[in-house]
Image: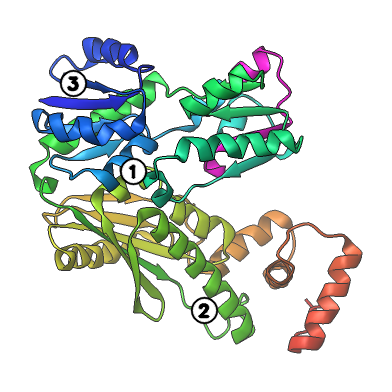
Amino acid sequence: MKIGFVSSEKYPKTIHRLADTEFPYIDILYLTYEDYTKVPQILEERQLECDAILFSGYLAYYYSRANCPQKVPWMVVQSQSSSLASALRTALEQGYDIHSLCICSLREYDFQSACREIGIDPQKITLYQTFPNPNDYAEPNDNQKVYRFYRRHLDDKNVSCCITSNLYAFQRLTSEGVPIIFMETSFDTFRQAFYSVYRQLIDPSNQQAQIVAVLVENDLPGDYSAVTRSEYQYMRRRLRVLEKIYAFANRLQGITSDAGFNQQMIVCTRNEFEAETKGFREFDLFREINRDIMGSCRFGVGYGITAIAAKQNACIALERARTQGPDSACLVAANGKNVSLISYLDQPERGLSGADGKLEALSKKAGISAKRLARFCEIIDDRKTRRFTTAELAAHARRLKTQHGQDFAAA
C-alpha cells in the first residue's frame, strides 16, 4: 500500500519517523511544495502512483480539488485541540500575553478544549477568529487573505498574540516582529490520520461508497410541554435548529431538504463528511443542538454508492438511533449492516424525554421548577444573551407577559 503525503517541507521528517516506527507496511510518497498553487500539477503527474492521497492541511486540499481531477481517494489531516494546546503552552513559555488572541480557522470547541487542557479559563481570553468558506481555498491568493486578517487586527491593536497554522502568514509576520506562534500538527494527529486512511483502504464494504446521507430528526413538543407555550416560541427554536443544520451542510458543501415536518436530510460526499466529523468521532452539529437548544434530536447517517442507497441506510440508522434514546446518533455503512452509535448526553430519567426530560434534570440540580426554567429559556431566546441583571430579567418578563399573555410572574 502506498500513500501520497502532500505537505510543505515542514512535516516529512515527522512522517518518516512515524512510518518507520508504526507503519512499516505503508510506503510513503512525499509530495512536498513551497507554493500550494503548484500542488494540482504535482498530483496530475503522480497521484496514480498511490492508493490514496493524504493532505497535511485544508489549503492545498481544497485548492487541488478545484483545480485537479481526483483519481484516487483524497483525505485531509484533521487538526485537533492538542495542537492548539501545545501552541498556547509555547506562547506562555515565551512570555507572550495571550489575553487577546487572533486565530484563523479554529472551531470554538477546540479552543475551549485546548484551554482546559493547559488549565486556562477560556472566558478570560478575547478571541478574534475567522472561518473561511471552503470555496475560498480555491483562490490562489488565500495566503494573502490569511496574512491580511492577522495584520488588520494587529494594526487595530486588538490582539496581543497570534497563533496560526498557515506557514506563509507565520513566516511573514515573524519577519515583522509580531508575537506569533506556529500551530504544528501533533505526532498523534498524524498517527490517527494514517490509521484512518489505512482502515478505509482495507475496508471493502465502503470502498465504493462515496455518498453520505444525514437524516436529522427533532422532537415535536407535546400538548402539555413546559417548553412550548406558544407557536411563536416553538417556531423560533425550530429556526435556530434549521440555522445550525444549514451551516453544517454548508461546511460539508452538501445539499439540504425537508424529509418531514420535523426531519431534514443532508446529502454530501463521504470525504467531506468524514473530514468534518473526524471519521464520525466528533459530530459538532449533534453537540451544538443538544447543548444550545432545549430539546432532543436524533441522527441517522447512511453510506451508499448512490444517493438513494445512502438515504435508505440513513433511515435504517435513524430507526436504530430511536431505540437508543432521545439524544443518539447512528451510522450504517454501505452494506447496511455495520453500525456505529454515539451519544453525547446522559439519557433523561425514565418516563421523560426530549426537552421536558432535560428541564426536569436541570431543575433538580438548580433547585427551581421546570416551568420557571422554561420561562428563563424563553427570555434567553428573546434577548439573545445569557447574561442579565435581576432588574433586566423582571422587566423582560413583564414585557413578554404583555406581548404573549403568558404569566411569567406566576412561574
At x 54%, y 42%, the residue is 109
Residue 81, relative to residue 303: is it above or below? above
* First of labels 3, 2 by sequence position: 3
> 10 Å neighbourhood of mark 3: few (<14), some, or many (≥20)?
some
Query: Which residue is identified by label 1?
Result: 62
Of badges 3 and 2, nearer the viewer stands 3
Q: The N terminus lies in which quarter of the figure? A: top left
> 10 Å neighbourhood of mark 2: few (<14), some, or many (≥20)?
some
Q: Residue 352 at what x, y percent from top left?
A: 51, 68
Q: SS of the residue at dot 1? A: helix
Front-most of 45 and 2?
45
Query: Looking at the image, can residue 409 be seen?
Result: no
Front-most of 47 and 14?
47
Query: Looking at the image, can residue 268 be seen?
Result: yes
Q: SS of the residue at dot 2? A: loop
Residue 10, relative to residue 269: is it above or below? above
Q: In the rendered image, which quarter is residue 332 located in?
A: bottom left
- Left or right: where 94 falls relative to 6: right
Q: In the rendered image, which quarter is residue 294 located in?
A: bottom right
Of badges 2 and 1, nearer the viewer stands 1
The reply to whether dot 3 and dot 1 touch (C-beta < 8 Å) is no
Q: Residue 353 at what x, y percent from top left?
A: 49, 68
Query: Which residue is identified by label 3?
Result: 29
Residue 109, relative to residue 185: is it above or below? below
Query: Which residue is identified by label 2?
Result: 221
Three-letter amino acid code of the residue under disc 3: Leu
Front-most of 104 and 262?
104
Quick one: which residue is furthest to the right in this view? 391
Three-letter amino acid code of the residue under disc 2: Pro
